[in-house]
Image: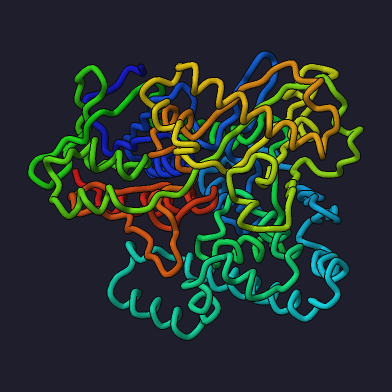
Amino acid sequence: MADLKDSYDAVVIGAGMAGLTCGALLAHEGMAVLVADRLPRPGGYCTSLPGDGFSFDPAVAILEGCDRGGIVAQTLSDLKVEDELELLPLDPLSEIIGPGYKLTVRRRLAGFGEDLKSLAPAESENVDRFLNECQAVYKQMALMAAGSPDLMGTGEKLAFLKDLLLKCGAVRKYGGKSAREVTHSSFADPKLRTILHGMALFLDPGTQATILMNMLGMMAAEDVFYPRQGGVMALPDTLAKALQRDGGVLALDTEVTKIVLAGDTVTGVELAGGARVSAGCVISAVDGRETFLKLIGEEHLGAKEIRELGEAKIYGSVVVVSLGVDMDLRSAGLTASEVSYCPVNDVDELFGTDPGKVGLGIRLHSLLDPTQAPQGHGTVVLVASFPYDYEDRWRGAAEDPGREEYEELKQSLADRLVASAENVLPGLSRHIVYERVATPVTLERATLNSRGSAMGWYPSPGGKMRSQKTRFRHLYQAGHWTFPGGSVPAVVASGRNAAQLALRDRRP
């Protein structure tokens, strides 16, 4: 634990991308800031984990919002650390492989529409229409994200609503529909539906269609990046350096166990071991349920609040199989470091629980950064969506993670995902020299995200995002459990918004 003072202007709980962004910006403005995290490394899901000479990115795989004008690029510039991080624009972005097709997705989706038309000539008009709609959604969501309603006065909110009504027709049109509804109504050919969902295998098809459409529009308008060295953790490491350079304190291995209240006013936090730190304001950049049910405590909440927090739907989780291999990955004939393998042309089965049919993300980041593996070796990370209660057996593992039944199920599932990946990387199982398997239970234990959630509260069609303000005075939220949602650019935006709220709230 770091040597801490008794009092800070602001305490940020959680050193993920949102917490680091908020803390670094506040420190840059001259505030005394403490960013505390129970983990031994910063970054949250945006991390790189070592293992027997290898390094793996288990969650975040690529960096968006880093192009000129992007929210991440703007934040690095504001903090004067834009030259500290060397990023490679990806080209190609990915490959999508499925029954009867192998599609290379180029930088800014160059030629993507024509590739789709060649696979399904009868859908040509539908392809043009859909991609144009994705561009409209992207532009309109950028307009909406230009400011946070939490930071707006009455006049600004009225102007924002006017823009939403007059300039954001595509967002309103698709915001009440699921991604599955839109892809299925747009295309009759199941290959095209699969390819579009395959471009975002982390994104449940039941979520708001605008999320998938915005991502596709962004990919056509901006570059996507990967750090030249250090994996995705190079980004949070850069923010951590900015925080500490400007006098902020990053306390790792430091767990906040309680948000201290005087009535409905936040006065500080309590750490594991009982030490208390007073604060002008507190920003919680951790799990939404954890923030209120545990750190605030149910005794300070009403019955309705407790019920809503317990019943609100949470985004799903993933299984991650990290492999160190003694094989030449380039010999497989792949041209991209990101591969989406879609064994079937059925969206529901692609997001089901049959390991032989589920969509499989295959990441080969050592092709971009050879320092992630010993010489003559490479890294392969397999990622597939799986529920917390898979076969009704994950849940029990939360209480007893080492029990034999759970370990056998985990290994069996990993073996079946490796077997599926061998359709892309023949002979993969014979070249594994290191293996680590993470389940939703693993992710929950490591990050305290409820049920191992990958992106916080579930963005249902027509749903509303939660405010970064809370009913507790001087307490704010940041991260994927609040506005504007999941993804690195979104949580960086939430960290920026939270910093502005804290600066406005600053008191002597």
Residue extending farthest to the top is 52
Give the position of the N terminus as an image quadrant: top left
Q: Is residue 480 visible?
A: no
How has the structure been colored for display? rainbow
**Residue 379 percent location from the top left of the image:** 74, 27
Position of residue 133 relative to residue 361, above or below, is below
| Quadrant in which the C terminus appears | top left
Horizontal side, residue 153 vs residue 55: left or right: left
Question: Residue 345, percent across and down?
Answer: 73, 57
**Is residue 484 left or right of 346 when viewed as pictured?**
left
Side of 332 relative to 225 (left or right): right
Q: Residue at x 45, y 32 (%)?
A: 394
Q: Position of residue 226 (x, y in %)?
A: 70, 41
Question: How many numbered markers are drawn?
Answer: 0
Q: As drawn, which residue projects farthest toward the left?
A: 263
Q: Is residue 95 above or below residue 123?
A: above
Q: Quadrant of residue 298?
A: top left
User: What residue is rendered at 85% in x and 66% in y?
Assistant: 119
437 shown above or below 290 = above
Compared to residue 154, the image places residue 271 above or below, namely above
Could you say which quadrant of the image residue 408 lies in?
top right
Using the image as rendered, state which of residue 410 and residue 109 is in the foreground. Answer: 410
Q: What percent of the width, then of the height, locates residue 134?
A: 64, 71
Q: Residue at x 76, y 30 (%)?
A: 366
- In the displayed structure, does residue 451 sit left or right of residue 68? left
**Which residue is at 69% across, 37% downward?**
227
Is residue 22 visible to us here?
yes
